Amino acid sequence: MKIISLDVMNVGIVLAYVVSSYRPGDMPPIIESLSEKYADPIPQAVIITGIVIGFSVLTLLVVLSVSLMERTGKSDVKILERMMKE
């Protein structure tokens, strides 16, 4: 549940940036024309990078949790946290 919550938070942050940066009438910066207004490509690249990093962190957490579960034989988070404190 903690891993899923982290992923939901990551998706929420990306969605908040996408919604806040939307401007009606702007077009993607693909066609070169001086008469049109185009969106800035830098924030788009930053958001894509954030999505990739979020997916990488999610994958790493899933692999580490499966590895921890295989080593200890336990899948309950409360028991694992208690074992870590001891």
Image: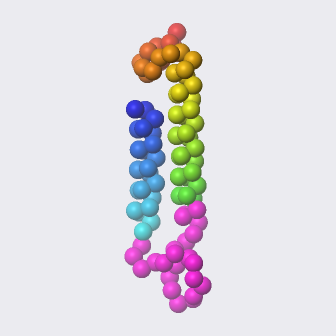
What main secondary structure does the magenta stretch of the protein show?
Answer: loop
| Along the viewing direction, whichever of 21 and 83 lies nearer the viewer | 83
Rendered-image quadrant of the N terminus: top left
Query: For the point 45% across and 66% down, which residue is it?
Result: 21
The vertical placement of 19 against 38, above or below, is above
**Segment tinted magenta in the rendering:** 23-45
Q: How is the image coloured?
A: rainbow
| Along the viewing direction, whichever of 38 and 57 lies nearer the viewer | 57
- Residue furthest to the bottom in view is 35
Query: For the point 58% across and 36% down, which residue is it?
Result: 60
Question: Percent from the top left, x then y, of residue 74?
Answer: 47, 17
Quadrant of the rendered structure where residue 31 is?
Answer: bottom right
Does the magenta portion include 36?
Answer: yes
Q: How many marks?
A: 0
Query: For the point 52% across and 40% down, which residue is it?
Result: 58
Does the magenta portion include 31?
Answer: yes
The vertical placement of 71 against 22, above or below, is above
Question: Percent from the top left, x then y, of residue 50?
Answer: 55, 52
| Along the viewing direction, whichever of 1 and 15 lies nearer the viewer | 1
Question: Percent from the top left, x then y, of residue 48?
Answer: 55, 58
Query: For the point 52% across and 21% down, which residue is it?
Result: 69
